[in-house]
Amino acid sequence: MIVHISQRISQEGAPHRVDVTFPKTAPRGKTLGSTSRENITALFPIHHLADASSEGLAILYRGRIIEANRPLLSCVGTDLQNVPSIRDILPGALKTPPDNSYHPGVLRTLEGRSFQVEFRLTPLRRNDLDCLALAVTFPPCLSASRSLSPESVTGLGGREEFEKAVSAFLGNGTTRQPAGILLHANINRFRTINERYGTRIADNVLSEIGQRLRAFLTEECIVARLGSDDFGIFCPFPYEHPDQATRWAQIVRDIFHTTLSINGHRIHLTASIGCCLIPFDTYRFETACHYAELALNEARRLQSPDWISFTPLMQADVHHRSELEHDLQRALETNQFFLEFQPLICLRTNRIECVEALLRWQHPTRGVISPNEFIPIAEESGLIVSIGRWVLLEACAQVSRLPSHVRVAVNISAVQFLHDDMYAAVIQTLFQTGLAAERLELELTESIFLEAVQRNLETMSKIRALGVKIVMDDFGIGFSSLNYLRSFPFDRIKIDRSFIRDMLNDPQAQSIVSAIMTLGHAMSMEVIAEGVETAAQLDMLRHTSCSTAQGFLMGRPAPLANLSAYPGMTDTPVISGQNSSP
């Protein structure tokens, strides 16, 4: 939920009051008086901005800490789910007036340590819900002892030490003799580990990685923690034997791709790794760092299980992507985006029951650009949030003018879901367009579960409680599809088009399609077949429990106006097997 906070001071110098504005719609069946910690937390998400604060920050409701930033949780030595009451960690705090003035106090950690701190309380009020905002100023000694710098957690050097050591090894850059591989590794989904297990477990993971790096690499190698979950590794080798770079890359990959057992938890780790060779790719250390970063970005984009080596094409790709990012920023402002819609046909009634909104970009000089090309750039740059909101609003606005039995399906990027307030976005869109919640479907892929799993599940549940349908897209191609069906009661699952394409000639694909149909029926989820292109495919689907089909056979994506004459858009049934594309 987006929180707008403003502080006002009266002319008489009265205490500050923080006003918090929320959407008026609450989850169904919930009252503020009986709100759980998790639901209240959803109303006060301060962690996105507050983790960077040097103060410990928290929001209190009835003496409970319902939200806190990382510095405070790390200092106390716990996570949000297990944080003690404020009376246990800051005795007497609730007896002080909430006047936004600093007061002395004693902060107690779970390790039994106590520190003199200063804290202040500020009233938070929303209608009849009274809360308190807490800010704790740590003493310098505590800040230093709780620092999450690379040296204190992993025992490795930091960025500055790494740069000096590698530069010293390479000399002044004029000789061709010094050689080595520079690797930049980033732990995948480390944020999820931090949120799921808490900061202490996450720090233990980093510590274990530090130990593995020191154990499996030789003394000649230079290793450092460059940031929160980033590591730099330089492994020298004789100039005459650049083939040794592969061996070092394999060792580094195996260091990060492992399963750790920490405090009874088995944590599976992988990492994205980019590398470049010195002096074969470049003589200069600064340029080598840039090249390794480009290779790392490519590894992230490809979700590669192996390392990615720098190639000159990456530099050209960066320039191309930079130009597209700049053009994307203007695309929304100048109305370059438009939507096309593809019909979904109910196999029982032969009527169009839903249309899927598909984003298109009419570039002024390059023509129509494929979403596969610009969506990843929008996600990396953060523009996907504003673009995604436009798509949601425009799709609902157009479909609101169609017959009431026609729904609209909108694809939601996992990046947008993570960084936007999707619950508020859906409520605002439905209010502005007048579309009934039951006529909106959100299509999500498995990547929605890669980060902030619990928070995303809570958001999905709140959206579903409005009446909006939640659909799992591309079902069957991920590693954990079945597990995700257990985690959330999806309304519909969409079989990936690859199975539909191959089911006529591949018995295994046909068996998978049949199994998904049975699974969907058993779990009371409707099943949609995507990518139906031939009459034979449609005929086979009609002999299963598949409820809905989508594909070029029923209609190609087109402006909504072009679909008005399609059979099924009114009460006229669609003719089985007829390709009615415009």
Image: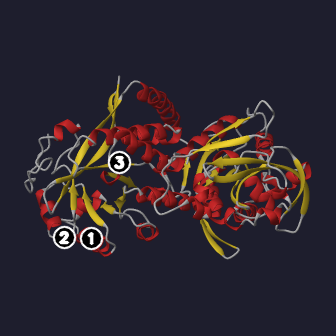
Task: For residue 6, say whether it is visible.
Answer: yes
**Label 3: which residue?**
410
Of badges 2 and 3, nearer the viewer stands: 3
Mark 3 residue crowding within 10 angstroms, few (<14) / some (14–19) / many (20+): many
- Give the quarter of the image for residue 188: bottom right
Reading the chain from its start, which is encountered first: label 1 or label 2? 1
**Label 2: which residue?**
544
Residue in view at x 39 percent, y 43 percent: 431
How many angstroms separate mark 1 from mark 2 (CA)?
7 Å
- What amino acid type is highlighted by mark number 2? Thr
Q: Is residue 374 left or right of residue 283?
A: left
- What amino acid type is highlighted by mark number 3? Val
Secondary structure beneath dot 2 equals: loop
Residue 517 marker: 1
Coordinates of residue 56 in the picture (x, y in percent):
78, 51
Residue in view at x 42 percent, y 59 percent: 465
Reading the chain from its start, which is encountered first: label 3 or label 1? 3
Q: Is residue 128 left or right of residue 347?
A: right
